[in-house]
Amino acid sequence: MHTLVGVTASLLVESLSLYRSHLGDVIRTAVLQSRQRYRLLSIADVRLQDDLQAQLDQQTSVVSAYMDLLARPLPAPGALWADISTDEIDGLGELPGVQAVMLMRLTSSGVFVVERSAGVKSRAIAALLATPGMEPMLDPQSPRGRGLSAVAWRSAEIQRSASYANDARYAAWHSQATALVVRSALSIPVRDVLGNSVAVLSFFGAYPNQFESATMQQFARGLQERWSQIWSRCLAIAPVVQEKQAKAIRERLFSGGLQMFIQPVVDLRDGSVPKVEALARLMLEDGKVLAPAQFLPLLGDTELDHLFRIGLSQALDHLVSWDGENLPLSVGVNLAPSTLLDPNCAFWVEEALRAHEIAPHRLSLELLETESLDHTAQDEAIERLTRLGVNLVMDDLGSGYSSLIRLSLVPFNAIKIDQSLVLGLRKSPLLNLSMIRAMVQLGHDLGREVILEGLEDTGMMEAALILGANFGQGYGLARPMQAESLPGWLAAFRSPIVAQRVQTYLGALAHHWLYTQSVLADVHIPLQSCPVTAFFESQGLADSEPAEWHVRCHGGGNIQAASQKLTNWLIEQVLDEGLNWIGNLR
């Protein structure tokens, strides 16, 4: 207690010296024999020396407990937020004098919610701060927006309160805090690389003045730096969800709430559907469906492993069911980087395939490579899966970190080009056409199948096919559906695109852009065989100026000038076409 309220070693020595002096005065004036007086003084000296030593030892122990947390190794880049934040908060909650520590984040409505908590009073304080009308707020005009957490967030600076009960900023919570034995507070804003507040660590102390000493201020600064580093290193930062709600989501997920929805993967060349992807969804008891982004970041490594095993079993169950309906499909399942590196991963996959009597080549495992992965460990894990005979897919190529050298060395059977590039066709058509074409060509050169994700409309599908992609996936073809709906969907499905035919301006631009690259390679297409010629005719533009530019591109004049004019005109039409598409979605 003395350490936490700021009693220093020198003050302890001075206080005990004064006490010894006063005690000596009392003993010297007492009616005692000299020998008794001497013995009493000797006993008092030993007793006071023992007391001083005990307090100094405790001071060292308490300070070490706080500082040792700062000295713990930082998580490796790519660690999961759910695991790291829980582990860190649990450690802070065990510190001497800490009644509770809260990891708080701000919702879009300007209300702070407790995401993680620990400490002897954590449950009661978290419940209090989640009570309607008692939640801390960001708004400085509200009485609930003047507490330390809100001030720390707004200022991005550490805030302290030496006496909670006497601090006017905490007026809204004074009575409850007294009952919970909260006497001091500390709020530390967690900042991102730009210095913006992204979370707040709120401590509630058992003693007044607990966070005021130089040692505690040093601890607070060190903890702020530590958590800012943790934030920058972690993958999958969870959405802002109350601690109680996050726990309920995890419990529901592993008690029958997980359901693997199915999204078809279409062969763009002939409209067939040889494979599907199984996508995790959480079915709540009220019928609401949560997408992965709403629950995956709440899970740690062990929970992700368990989720993979449940999802894999469900996906293979679907294959068995479809086989019974004479639908011999293949299925893809996402594999988290942390699960891939689990030594038992290959055994889990082998066990599931054997139990369902499914041939390994009918299963694809979709891997998202991250910069933080240990390549040696990853290679060993992939080798174990390769020996099983399953297919491996590099997921989200073009979305962030991906090494082209790794792509050439790792035995991927297919690559998936991220939907962000496909959706970019409606914003920066030429740039994204060029990038997609380069990735498609790279995939083909390496002998990989190429799948384009995010195909939202017919134009995107046409562009994907023209650029050479084998397969496509996206809402324009099919939304994720429950497994029992797939047979009916397959029976009714007809591909909206036809090879060597253009129906959209985006398709026309993709064909024209690719044709200009072919001309540079001295490859020419006859005018009448060009799909763009038929497209102009179908649009009633056969006699238009753009049609004349198109004719010149096939050798009827200044090809370079005509090609540039046609390209610029088609880009304008593609952007307008995209606006119409967005309007239809709304």
Image (tube, rainbow, N blue to C red):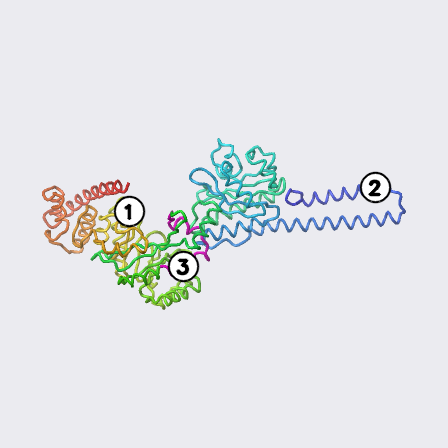
**Image quarter (top left, top right, bottom left or bottom right) of the C terminus:** top left
359 relative to 528, above or below: below
- Provide residue 293's location: percent of width, then percent of height: 39, 49
Residue type at mark 1?
Answer: Gly
Q: Which residue is mark 2?
A: 26
Which residue range is magenta in the image?
A: 288-314
Q: Which mark is residue 584?
A: none
Residue type at mark 2?
Answer: Val
Residue 289 lies in the magenta-colored region: yes
Measured Cα–Cα span from mark 2 to mark 3:
77 Å
- Provide residue 459's location: percent of width, then percent of height: 22, 48
Near mark 2 (Cα within 10 A), the count class, few <14, some 14-19 or many ≥20, is: few
Q: Which residue is at the front of the view, 184 or 28? A: 184
Q: Which residue is mark 3?
A: 310
Disc 3 secondary structure class = helix
Residue 32 lies in the magenta-colored region: no
- State which tag comes first along the sequence, 2 or 3: 2
Q: Which residue is at the front of the view, 212 or 497? A: 497
